[in-house]
Amino acid sequence: MHKIIAIDGHSSTGKSSLSKQISKQLGFIHIDTGAMYRAITLFAMRHGFLENGEVDKMGLIEKLDEIDIKFDYNAATEKNEIILNGENVEKEIRTMEVSNNVSPIAKIDEVRTLLVKIQRALAQEDGIVMDGRDIGTVVFPDAPVKIFLTASAHVRAQRRYDELKAKGVDVTLEEVTANVNARDKMDSERANSPLKKAEDAVEVNNDDLNAEETVEAVLKIIKEKLG
Ligand code: DC
């Protein structure tokens, strides 16, 4: 078994920043699978398969074989950035519009099958930190380390709001809270690969931990598990 560290959990718990830090410290590759679902959502929006929250599921499924998703390491941001059909869309996938539309896309079976296949292929290399919702349950059920990151909804909404405000995005705390709650509900209740803690995952609640403390807590768990 490769050294795969599966990090799952709710939205806005800081999974991606945590995974980035951990992969940096361990010299592992970081794969943000949420970025992959966001990239397909952006593709669907650009091709007119998403109008007013309604998905043209059949239209999108027919076009899935035209989608190429890769990552490209950017030394300046120290981030594995997402490339959709040759275009770096790391910035475009982080808008509120994509966040609001990603859950209905992520519940389409064909979309999940495609992305899980890419995710497994990406982990051919040794040393991977992969974050998402179903990494420890579906993508790599045999991963030697599984973390389930969580925090209360209001703490997560406040963090996301602060992050968006810092980027100059014009949103209210109410809008962000509504998005966090709606995504929690859709991610946990969908039939295919719902967000849930794997039985053998270690749960980390970071309500009272800052980013550095979360990294420390998780690195400690990894060292115990990997020796
Ligand atoms: O981690 P994120 O917020 O960027 O993820 C965006 C959405 O993608 C999230 O609402 C749920 C979905 N997702 C998923 O269904 N499975 C994954 N492995 C990762 C993300």
Image (cartoon, rainbow, N blue to C red):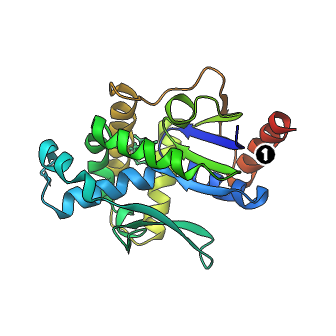
Q: In this rendering, is residue 100 above or below 165?
A: above
Q: Which of these two is toward me, 95 or 58?
A: 58
Residue at coordinates 43% horizontally, 56% vertically from top-left? 35
Q: Looking at the picture, tell me which residue is in the foreground, 208 or 30.
A: 30
Image quarter hosting the N terminus: top right
Examine the image and state in which quarter residue 226 appears. Answer: top right
Please indicate whether residue 117 sits to the left or right of residue 155 in the image. Answer: left
Secondary structure beneath label 1: helix
Query: Observer-nearest residue: 88 or 182?
Result: 88
Kind of residue indicated by mark 1: Leu
> Residue 125: horizontal and vertical position, in percent?
65, 53
**Seen from this angle, which residue lies furthest right?**
227
Where is residue 176? Give x, y as percent.
Answer: 37, 50
Tell me if residue 15 comes above or below residue 141 in the rendering: below
Residue appearing at x 33%, y 33% in the figure: 186
The answer to which of 200 and 53 lies nearer the viewer is 200
Residue 191 percent across, percent down from the top left: 33, 24
Seen at 25% across and 52% down, the residue is: 64
Say whether residue 74 is left or right of residue 211.
left
Q: Which residue is mark 1?
A: 219
Q: Can residue 97 be seen by looking at this rendering? A: no
The 10 Å Cα crowd at callout 1, few under 14, some 14 to 19, many 20 or more, is some
Which of the 4 image quadrants contains residue 221? top right
Res. 30 in view: yes
Quadrant where the C terminus is found in the figure: top right
- Residue 89 lies left or right of residue 17; in this view the side is left
Residue at (62% x, 40% y) in the render: 6
Which quadrant holds residue 92?
bottom left
Ligand 1 quadrant in view:
top left
Q: Position of residue 184 (x, y in %)?
A: 40, 35
